[in-house]
Amino acid sequence: MLSDMFKHYIYLILVGFFCCQIHAIEPKEILARADAARGNLDGVRWTVEITDADEATRKIEVRARGFDMRAETLAPSRQKGHTLLLSKGNMWFYKPGLSKAVPVSTRQKLAGKAANGDIASTNYAEDYEVLSMQEGMLDSEPCYLFELQAESRNVTYARIKYWISKERLVGLRAEYYNPDGSKQLKHANMSYAHSILKQGEDIPFISRISISDAIGDTTKTIMKFSPPELGPVPNRLFSPQSLAR
């Protein structure tokens, strides 16, 4: 009798273990879900207002498809028409008067503490290697804590610590480091007041990013995103040659 009970007990443990394994979510899938709340759509448009203590507020219109993006400055007037293009991982800059677009880095400063790549969709699931994933808390919310290492030089940040909500699967906080992870450069906190309907599922969408230096300067650069508008974005917008026309 005792032997049968023991066997049954072991059976329940094994069933529970394998069920957990079947339903366990993989690290790359968690990152992909968080990426979905930062863009990566078939066609989407939004505007970003970037406010910094040392600069005039900049308003930018972004049109994106997948991880390609075209961002045109609408204000202030002296920067009107300045355009960033991200296509297949490469970025170009154009402003009225240039004969052609010039290559730039996603890591270059855009406004305040925001880099060029901060207004684009994230692709952490493909652009970064997962060094570790732990469970933790952020502001009383259970999270997955990732350590990520860039797999190419084309991405905005070389190394990231990234907190993703376990329940909502959106990125809540990111800390950006130098390549060997020894020095934190800045950090960002994200909010998701918007939502989109994707494949029949209502998912959160980015509405605000607050970026601060790691040490020293206590001012913040605030990026406010308008509600996203879904719709087709034509191929021609993602050609560097189209910028100078």
Image (cartoon, helix red, strand yellow):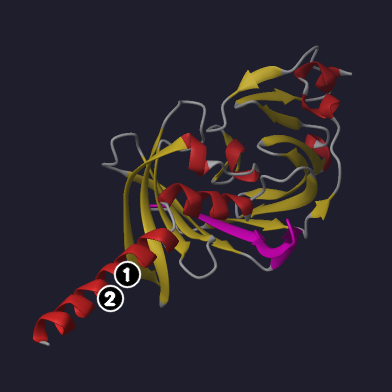
Q: What stretch is highlighted in magenta?
A: 194-214
Quarter of the image holding residue 24?
Answer: bottom left
Query: Which image quarter holds the C terminus?
Result: top right
Q: Nearer the viewer, residue 238 or 51?
A: 238
Indicate left or right for 204 with 27 as reference.
Answer: right
The residue carrying pointer 2 sits among few (fewer than 14), some (14 to 19) or many (20 or more) residues within 10 Å by Cα, namely few
From this viewpoint, which residue is outermost toward the right? Answer: 245
Expressed as whole percent of the image width and height from the top left, the position of residue 174 reads 45, 54
Q: Nearer the viewer, residue 157 or 89?
A: 89
From this viewpoint, which residue is outermost toward the bottom? Answer: 1
Q: Nearer the viewer, residue 105 or 125?
A: 125
Residue displayed at 33% across by 63% down: 18
Indicate left or right for 154 with 98 as reference.
Answer: left
Q: Are marks 2 and 1 in contact (CB under 8 Å)?
A: yes
Most common secondary structure along the magenta stretch: strand
- Is any atom of residue 215 visible in this view? no
Expressed as whole percent of the image width and height from the top left, the position of residue 21 reads 36, 60
Quarter of the image holding residue 223?
Answer: bottom right
Please give the residue where the numbered disc 2 appears in the rendered image: 12
Compared to 176, does 151 lie above or below?
A: above
Indicate left or right for 15 with 89 as reference.
Answer: left
What mark, if any, has residue 45 been given in the picture?
A: none
Residue displayed at 77% across by 27% down: 238
Please give the residue where the numbered disc 1 appears in the rendered image: 15
Query: Which image quarter holds the N terminus?
Result: bottom left
Expressed as whole percent of the image width and height from the top left, the position of residue 206 reads 65, 58
Q: What residue type is labelled 1?
A: Val
Residue displayed at 42% across by 52% down: 26
From this viewpoint, which residue is outermost toward the left? Answer: 2
